Amino acid sequence: MRKIKLLIILLVAFKIAGAQELKANVTIVSSQVQNNVNQNVFRTLQTALYNFINNRKWTSDTYQQNEKIECNFLLNLQSTSELNVYTASLTVQAARPVYNTSYLSPIINFKDDNFIFKYVEFQVGEFNENRVSGADALTSNLTAVLAYYVYMILGFDYDSFSLRGGDPYFQKAQNIVNNAPDGRGIAGWKAFDGIRNRYWLVENMMNSRYTIMHDVYYNYYRLGLDKLYEDENGARVEIMNVLNLLNNFITDNPNKMISQFFFQGKSTEMIKIFTKAPQQDKSRASELLQKLDITNAGKYKDELK
């Protein structure tokens, strides 16, 4: 678990000498794959993806072991009619430590259902950010998707410590989108592939019309959660301001992916933050949260009475 030893803002500027950036768990679920497929393939795949994510250097910064970003990648596989080709859902989760506590706040909790790739046992996972798509699009799609989410994790994490600190990593993710593998069955990289996919997530974070979302992430984590220990009331005010920012953003930009993405995995956290608030603030928070996070509206209504 990453601990903050100095002022959190310094974490962005000075990553103390150490190892790679991520502490990722990789899980492969293959119960839906045809029985005639050798299960050893999935064990080697899991090892290959673990090494690809954890052992690659993704930034120019260096981290101590206890500063690594904790995250999870869960692939739920299905076989296809083509040899060594799989469709999958990929669930990506990442958490960010809260200053002066042992608590990890969810910063990404997203399920991507548009994942197809080719994997031959013992193949080496190769990725070149300057040439994302290789000769075999389905093979390239495996590492392209994973690298994309690594950069999105880094982008959101850095944004939460320093205003616009994640820009270099969102740019790298967008570069993957712009040069993504293109072939039969591959989806999630194009605007027309849906309204909530890889294309739209990074587009929303790079779009100059939506810069307020960078304020949302920085203010929520750095000015809000990180201050809860030393100034609970002041921190709660900042988080209420974030809800007001989001309310304005959604009013002006309805049905954008990033606004719903922000709330995924945060309902329990939001309820805990406002449970001890004065009744007037609690009621206002409940009203806003029911409007902004419709999926969990019932929870807010019941828990923030």
Image (cartoon, rainbow, N blue to C red):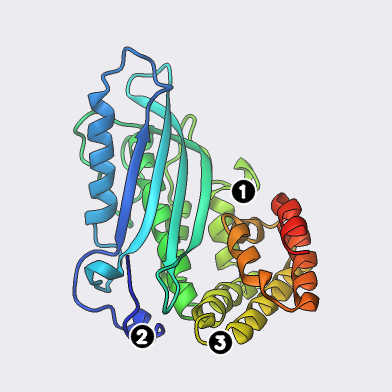
Q: Is residue 104 left or right of residue 139?
A: right
Q: Residue at x 23, y 25 (%)?
A: 40
From the top left corner, tell me how far across and down residue 244 is, in percent: 73, 75
- Residue 245's place in the image compared with 36, above or below, is below
Residue wearing tag 1: 196
Q: Secondary structure at mark 2?
A: helix
Residue at left 64%, top 79%? 236
Q: Is residue 42 left or right of residue 159?
A: left
Name, please, the residue furthest toward the top.
Answer: 36
Question: Which residue shows up at 70% across the image and 52% down it?
Answer: 296
- Residue bearing mark 2: 10
Q: CA distance from mark 2 to mark 1?
A: 34 Å
Q: Residues within 10 Å of mark 2 (few under 14, many from 20)?
A: few
Visible in this render: residue 172? no
Residue 109: % across, % down: 51, 53
Residue assigned mark 3: 231
Dot 3, how many residues are within 10 Å of its Cα: few (below 14), some (14-19), or many (20+)?
few
| Sequence order check, earlier mark of 3 and 2 | 2
The Cα–Cα distance between marks 3 and 2, rounded to whole angstroms, is 20 Å
Percent coordinates x, y for residue 187 in the rendering: 52, 38
Q: Quadrant of residue 210?
A: bottom right
Amino acid type, label 1: Arg
Please tell me whether mark 3 or mark 1 is closer to you in this view: 3
Q: Nearer the viewer, mark 3 or mark 2?
A: 3
Q: Earlier in the sequence, mark 2 or mark 1?
A: 2
Please name whichever residue, 131 or 32, is drawn nearer the observer in this view of the structure.
32
Question: Where 208 falls versus 174 (above or below)?
Answer: below
Tell me where residue 241 sits by quadrant: bottom right
